[in-house]
Amino acid sequence: MTVSVVRFDSSLDSIGRAIELCGGFDKLDRSHRVLIKPNITFSGWMPIPPYGMVTTSKVIEGILRQLSDHGCKDVTIGEGTVAEVLGSNTRRGFKYTGIDRVAKRYGAKLIDLNDGPFERRELGTAKVGVSKAVLDADFLINVPVLKTHPQVKVSLGFKNLKGCLDTPSRKRFHHKGLDHSICLLNQLLKCDLTIIDGIYMLEKGADTLMGTAHRKDLIIASRDTFACDCVGATILGIEPSQVGYLKEYAELHSRPLDISTVQVTGEDVESLKEKLDWESVAEDELLNFGITGLAVPHPGHTLCSGCYGSLICALGIFAKANPNRDFSGTQICWGRNRANGAPGGRIILYGDCGISSNRNEEPAAKIAGCPPPMMSTLLTLMKTLLSRPKMISTLLLGSPQLLALRVGLYSGNLQKWQRYRSPEFDKSHF
Ligand code: SF4
């Protein structure tokens, strides 16, 4: 199966060329019910830069134009963002990416996959709820972003399908083995076409809270999601054999992981290879604010995006309001991590998983929830880590800002986001 790698030249034609070069519409009939699945991780009230994190409306528009030229009339765009974290919901996500605007222009329907209905399907030893809209589609187009991921190294076509599940099933993935579950999911759901949106790529993904976006100007497409992901991973600088779910899938289906066996048309992959980091370290981010001594060891695959988004966002706001402080001996345990701090140190147990995995610990604080809300996370961090006078002054000075952030009057800009003011980061792509 062919993988096309095409330079994005700012025109919609480049998306059409990528589809054409890989024979993307060869099996598409104009009477088909088409479902496009973008990647809109989350989209709450905090204006997080979208570059490399969510699918651009530019690429979606290019696909919609091709579908319209092909004569397709029944086109739906379906996504289910991480729900409720920082007020995230899918409708907001369609607006945040500009996908609502292009959908209207081309007469495509928008659906929130989180609303269901879902059908129960076997996935290994577990049962998962899969969106009926996805199962019912005649032609499924998967549109992930070219990005790294702090747990599974890359988040491309295979990983993007996780958004087709109901929320409890997604959470269960983290406890059943993320790589294994993603591999199984891609045996259950088959995409007819995968188009990786590489206008931007993301290092230390999967979001711009921790990750850093770069301009890449690429579109990678194939009718074969596995081959498409192998090429995408290679361009990010990560060997497909190092990606757990690709390796497992290759073994199960006797597929080579070496992309020299893939027929690539368009650009030369070798010359496009990057060397991006995929691991993100919360302590490094805190250090940018001069915060030391606060350990937040990553719990690996057991952490869901909900806890991740809530805690990272709260830590970012906390650190910005309290720079250059030392919290030596303090450890935050999240996911299924077991506490391993220094004797006598302070332990903060985060989320229901963090609490249940450390029943015997004497924590300084427990922040319950699945996931815990961001605001209560922030308040508990202040209560636990700051003296009473400092906490009161932070609250008095910070509350108006937080309120303004909440209602969209203040951007909450982090220093690291200044880079997105450069012209290479083009707002009109969203
Ligand atoms: S507590 Fe957090 S990590 Fe555990 S299942 Fe809930 S969201 Fe996932």
Image (cartoon, grey):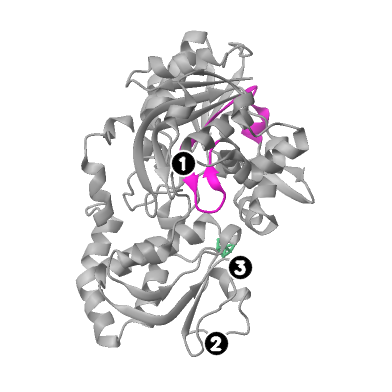
Q: Callout 3, which amino acid?
A: Arg
Decide if residue 326 is on the left or right side of residue 166: left
Q: Secondary structure at mark 1?
A: strand
> For the residues marked 1 and 3, what is the alpha-carbon distance in whole angstroms?
25 Å
| Residue shown at 64% from the left, 47% from the top | 244
| Residue shown at 34% from the left, 66% from the top | 286
Q: Residues within 10 Å of mark 1 (few under 14, many from 20)?
A: many
Residue 376 percent coordinates (x, y): 41, 70
Decide if residue 336 is on the left or right side of residue 180: left
Q: Does any atom of ligand 1 lie closer than 8 Å to the CB of label 1?
A: no
Name the residue that disc number 1 marks.
147
Q: Earlier in the sequence, mark 2 or mark 1?
A: 1
Residue extent of the magenta highlight: 132-156
Q: Callout 2, which amino acid?
A: Glu
Foreground of the two, 250 or 31:
250
From the image, which quarter does the C terminus lie in? top left
Residue 381 percent coordinates (x, y): 38, 75
Q: Earlier in the sequence, mark 1 or mark 3?
A: 1
* Disc 2 versus disc 1: nearer the observer: 1
Name the residue that disc number 3 marks.
336
Q: Does any atom of ligand 1 lie closer than 8 Å to the CB of label 3?
A: yes
Residue 95 percent coordinates (x, y): 37, 38
Decide if residue 7 is on the left or right side of residue 81: left
Q: Secondary structure at mark 3?
A: loop
Name the residue that disc number 2 marks.
362
> For the residues marked 3 and 2, what is the alpha-carbon distance in whole angstroms?
16 Å
> For the residues marked 2 and 1, what is the alpha-carbon distance in whole angstroms?
39 Å
Residue 153 on the magenta segment: yes
